[in-house]
Image: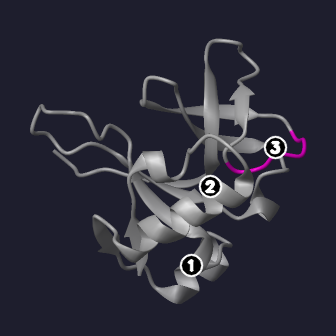
Amino acid sequence: MIPEVQPTSLAMAGSSERVGKGLEEAKRQPARTWGFPLDYLTSTLKADAHDLVVVDSDPSSSSGTPSERYVVNTAASSLSEAGTFVLRSPSGSLFVRQLEARNRSPGETLIAEDREEAGTLMGRLIMRMSLAE
C-alpha cells in the first residue's frame, strides 16, 4: 500500500535528514492508502513501494471536485537523472517541472530551468491519477 501524505511532509525546510524524518512520520499516519500490484510497481513504474507516496495536487481546493493525485518517488537515487519532478512553492501549491540531470536531495530548493518559480523538491513524478468526470 502506498500512503497518501500531505505535501508539507515532503517539503520541509532544512536538511534531507529532517525531510526524511518528516516523511516517515507522515507515512505512519497517512490521509489514505492506495493499492497497486507489486509487479506493476517494479516492472512498469520501476520503483520500490517503500519510496513512493501519493500527494494531492491541490490540497487547499474547496471546489468539491476531486483533484489530481501525483505518485512521487522520494528515493534519493531517483533524483539525479533528468526528468519530471514535483516541487512545492513557498505558497504551498504544487507544480510539475522538467529538470536537467544533476545531483539533488529531497527538500532542496530549486529554480526550474524556465525560471518561472522556485520550489522545494518533493521527488520524481512517477504517475498522475485523476477521476474521470
Q: Nearer the viewer, mark 2 or mark 1?
A: 2
* Residue 1 x/y as whole percent: 41, 81
Residue positioned 41% across, 76% down in the render: 28
Q: Quadrant of the C terminus?
A: top left
* Residue 34 x/y as whole percent: 35, 73
User: How many other residues sit within 10 Å of disc 3, few (<14), some (14-19) or many (≥20)?
Assistant: some
Query: As shown in the figure, which amino acid type bears the numbered disc 3?
Result: Ala
Residues under labels 3 and 1: Cα distance? Answer: 21 Å
The boundaries of the magenta stretch are 101-106
User: How many other residues sit within 10 Å of disc 1, few (<14), some (14-19) or many (≥20)?
Assistant: some
Pick the front one: 71 or 53: 53
What mark, if any, has residue 49 been given in the picture? Answer: 1
Figure quadrant of residue 112: top right
Sequence-earlier tag: 3 or 2:
2
- For mark 3, what is the residue? 82
Residues under labels 3 and 2: Cα distance? Answer: 22 Å
Sequence-earlier tag: 2 or 1:
2
Pick the front one: 50 or 44: 50
Q: Nearer the viewer, mark 3 or mark 1?
A: 1
In the picture as drawn, the residue positioned furthest to the bottom comes out as: 38
Check contact, mark 3 vs mark 1: CB within 8 A. Answer: no
What mark, if any, has residue 19 been given in the picture? Answer: 2
